[in-house]
Amino acid sequence: MRRRLVISYLLLMVLVLIALETPLAATLASRETDRVRADRLADATRFASLAGPALRGGVPGPLGGELGSYHELYGIGAAVVDRDRRTVVTSAGWRGGPATEAALDTALSGQQSSGPESVWPWVDGPLVVAVPINDGGEVLGAVVTATPVGEVRRTVTAWWLLLAGIGLLAVLACVSTAFGLAGWVLRPVTELDAVTHEIAEGDRSARVQHRLGPPELRRLAASFNNMADVVSDVMDRQRAFVAHASHQLRNPLTALRLRVEELGPSLTDPDGRAEHRLALEETDRLALVLDALLTLARAEREENERVTVDAAAVAASRVDAWQPLARHRSVTLRLVTSGPAYARTVPTAVDQALDALIDNAVKFSGEAGEVTVTVRPADGGTALEVRDTGPGMTPGQLDQATERFWRAPDVQNIDGAGLGLTIVAVLVDASDGRLTMRSGQSGGLVAELWFPAPPGAPAPEPRTAAAKTGPADADPVRA
């Protein structure tokens, strides 16, 4: 935008300079031509006064010497002709031509002649002046001079170059002023754009300086800051409410479960025992929902802080942690790595994301299923892939999978709150990573996480290792 403003200012300045300097340049050329023309007319008139006796007596007399001295002194050719266009006397450098013939025609008719009207830098022809020689009202002949215009052209060119230099200085001053003015006007807009991107990337503390630029943009900056404060406050209140509500509901929910559990021994009817079991399952499910809401609220509050972790070590730790559940459900859980793979994320992003994905994969794979967790470098970062052999999802279900509380229609009776993938999406987005899900070639679901690598991360070692059952917790390395 700054460039467009400067170009518009510059175009306006150039048009103004052209409108002002073009008439001035023409006036300077005409003035210089008129000055030379006046001198030549005066000289020709003096020669005409001396030429009268020469034409009447047919003897040049002192006129020949005058014309010769005139040419030697000024380099201007001159000639005297009679009424029959016969040359009476000429200077040594006289050269006739079409312009002199036309001027003689006018002078022999009794009128002075001079041309051209103005000498331009590109004009080569001489300045021709012709004056009639009168005697008692009778035209006896004419005096014509041909002045070289080289000196006039140089003078006009010098004036024009001076005007061009002044115009160039004015343009440079205009450009400098335009850049300063455009910068002053656009600085609040530029800062507003930068702050908008910072807020969109998660820095909700970014604000615009409202003391820059014109008053209208200052008011806009102040209004934007007020809006950002309100939005930030609303988001903080909303997240705080979710976190507090989830936390506060756990105590009465725990008490309710204990009371329902104590009712079990007093129930003898089979239907009552079945309802009692369902009530306990519902309280457990509600506890899972509250835990997921609390985790989601905490994940959405993560801002700015980044840590560097070895994603391969973290994946090994999480696979080890889920091995007992996988064995209990007859699911084969394994890890494939290619050495250390460093990623830069918000704290615990890799841990929580893998927990949610492995939990879903083990849960939906069924007996004799397989879950493979793969860690590899990819696209300048680190990719973690969780592949299962479960029923997978349709394209429409994949589009809805990260929505809050969404669950596929055919898994409504399976334990879960519908917030696991939502939490994964929030953590990945806060880490500037990406989450992609697709159906596997032979069935099942493939969920892939990608996190950016930290600056100066070491190159991965060319080796492949499988996960083993055993503790392999990895502490994050603070950036």
Image: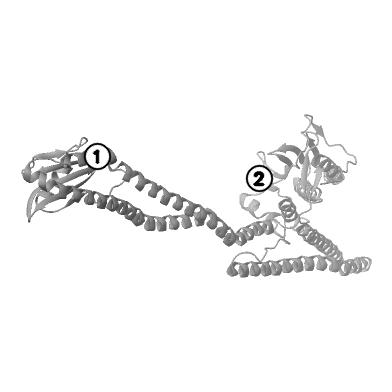
Image coords of residue 305 (percent x, y): 79, 53
Image-quadrant location for residue 276: bottom right
Image-quadrant location for residue 98: top left
Image coords of residue 331 (percent x, y): 80, 42
* Foreground label between 1 and 2: 1
Q: Measured along the vertical axis of the image, is residue 324 above or below residue 303?
A: above
Q: Residue furthest top?
A: 462
Mark 2, other Cα within 10 Å: few <14 / some 14–19 / many ≥20 = some
Numbered tag placed on residue 333 in the rendering: none
Q: Is residue 82 visible?
A: no
Q: Nearer the viewer, residue 341 or 255?
A: 341
Q: CA distance from mark 1 to mark 2?
A: 105 Å
Residue pointed to by mark 1: 69
Image coords of residue 140 (percent x, y): 7, 48
Q: Is residue 381 left or right of residue 125?
A: right
Image coords of residue 472 (percent x, y): 88, 41
Identify the element where label 2 is drawn.
Answer: strand
Image-quadrant location for residue 20: bottom left
Q: Is residue 306 left or right of residue 97?
A: right
Three-letter code for the amino acid on which mark 2 is drawn: Arg
Numbered tag placed on residue 438 in the rendering: 2
Q: Nearer the viewer, residue 184 or 64?
A: 64
Task: Tell me what residue is drawn at x 41 percent, y 52 percent.
Answer: 163
**Proximity of marks 1 and 2: CB atoms separated by less than 8 Å:** no
Q: Nearer the viewer, residue 280 or 219?
A: 219
Q: Is residue 335 left or right of residue 3?
A: right
Mark 1, other Cα within 10 Å: few <14 / some 14–19 / many ≥20 = some
Q: Is residue 36 left or right of residue 294?
A: left
Which color mode does the image show? one colour
